[in-house]
Amino acid sequence: MKYDIAIVGGGPAGLSAAYSASKQGAKVILFEKDPSFGHNVRTSGVSWIKEMEKYGISREFYNPIKNFSFISPNNEAKISGNDDTACVLDVKKTYQLLACKAAAEGAELLVKSQVTEVSQNRDDRTNTLKIVTPAGQKSVEATLIIDASGFSSFVARKLGYVKEWQRYGVGAEYECYCDSVDKSTLTLLVGKIYSDAGYAWVFPLSNNRVRIGVGIGKPNSKLDPIKKLNELTQNRIKPLDSMGKIQPIEFHFGLIPNQGLRTKSVFNGLILVGDTVGQANPIVLEGIRYAIEFGRLAGKVGAESLAYGSTESSLRSYEIANKTTLEKKINSALKVQSRWLSLSDSEWDREIDIIKELTIDEFLDFIKSEFTPSRMIKVALNHPKLLAKQLFNLVLNR
Ligand SMILES: Cc1cc2nc3c(=O)[nH]c(=O)nc-3n(C[C@H](O)[C@H](O)[C@H](O)COP(=O)(O)OP(=O)(O)OC[C@H]3O[C@@H](n4cnc5c(N)ncnc54)[C@H](O)[C@@H]3O)c2cc1C
């Protein structure tokens, strides 16, 4: 079978690409190896209400968040907002909504279908994919492949364009019943008792349902996040001690690249999107909104490129948008992250004192990696404390 565009991976990036490419009139097929979209949750699902609303993800798909708490071994900063700004997504429901949007535009979506081989024929500019499906092995041809396979970068690696990620985060999480949790507050936990190179989190879905997780940076630490997560939940380390009964309902596990954007995101007949190309904010491991935004762009640019044989030059506008929107932001965030990974517990206690000084808007800019020089200068002027200056100088020195 011949398609205009074959998409590998049915996470937020692939599903959003399938939606916009089909909307442009392209003949699209998408392959997802799991039995359903959102079947294996590989994320803790925190995002931003404004962006989610923009993509048609409404209130019924998330728990809204107004307050943010940062806890270190001997300190705590609570930053309260007036409005709901962040949200904790119902991940399965959200990804299946993205799948329905793509299907409504005419995309063909295959679950339990793993792409196992990819080749490019340089003469007639077609790509061939081999897929193992419940109905047996399948082979399809496509003018363009969108690699949305996430951390594995399956297609780009198979074709020899990229290598596997060297720096990455590993996260393990329980979605739990608990007797009581404040459903309007996100909590980040820093210091060695929570993670020796990273952080732990408490992300509520309601007053009785919460995601408790541990993220660890590799190769910085050899620690197993699952072991640390079990220690945290079994020993009821603060703030879990105030949540009454805690009963895990579901286990989540995932890997996220942590070394910035790949050098290139487009090749002849191929676009890389989402985690495949490193489109995530490393400070708080946040990639869902970028996966949707750049998935939509990849589908649109990809569909427009078909008239030109989807050559690398016809995909250039995607590469430019990727670099101009994300490169500086992610590189600055990596600097902050690298500093955070090296902090001792007592340094974290002092860092929390700096965070306490921030207004809600400054804090949000900070964790969203909105490090424009004008915003950072304003923050540094508003907070003449030496440590605050040091923190932001680090970001501005790029
Ligand atoms: C522990 C952890 C916590 C996170 N928390 C957050 C958070 O709170 N907020 C946030 O915004 N981001 C978070 N992220 C990041 C976010 O999950 C990713 O940035 C986002 O999922 C990237 O989307 P994607 O579509 O590129 O990749 P993925 O969501 O990984 O989707 C890739 C899909 O491709 C499929 N696939 C792979 N290979 C093949 C193949 N050969 N054939 C067919 N299918 C294939 C996979 O099964 C998968 O469904 C977190 C990540 C981790 C690891």
Image: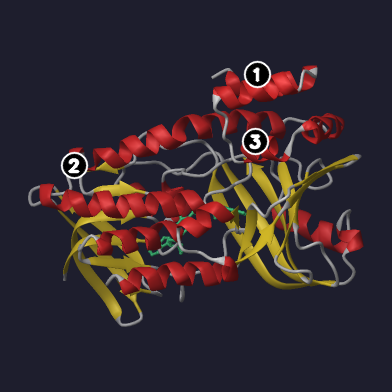
Residue 340 horizontal side relative to residue 276, left or right: right
Q: Earlier in the sequence, mark 3 or mark 1?
A: 3
Name the residue tied to disc 1. 393
Which image quarter: residue 75? Answer: top right
Label 3: element kind: helix
Per the rendering, the mark at residue 366 is 3
Up/down of 362 relative to 309, above or below = above
Q: Earlier in the sequence, mark 3 or mark 2?
A: 2
Asked if the residue at tag 2 contacts the one at tag 3, i.e. Cβ–Cβ closer than 8 Å, the answer is no
Alpha carbon separation for disc pair 1 and 2: 39 Å
Q: Label 3 amino acid?
A: Phe
In the rendered image, residue 348, in percent from the top left (x then y), is placed at 81, 33
- Cβ of disc 3 within 8 Å of ligand 1? no
Label 1: element kind: helix
Per the rendering, the mark at residue 314 is 2
Q: Residues within 10 Å of mark 1 (few under 14, many from 20)?
A: some
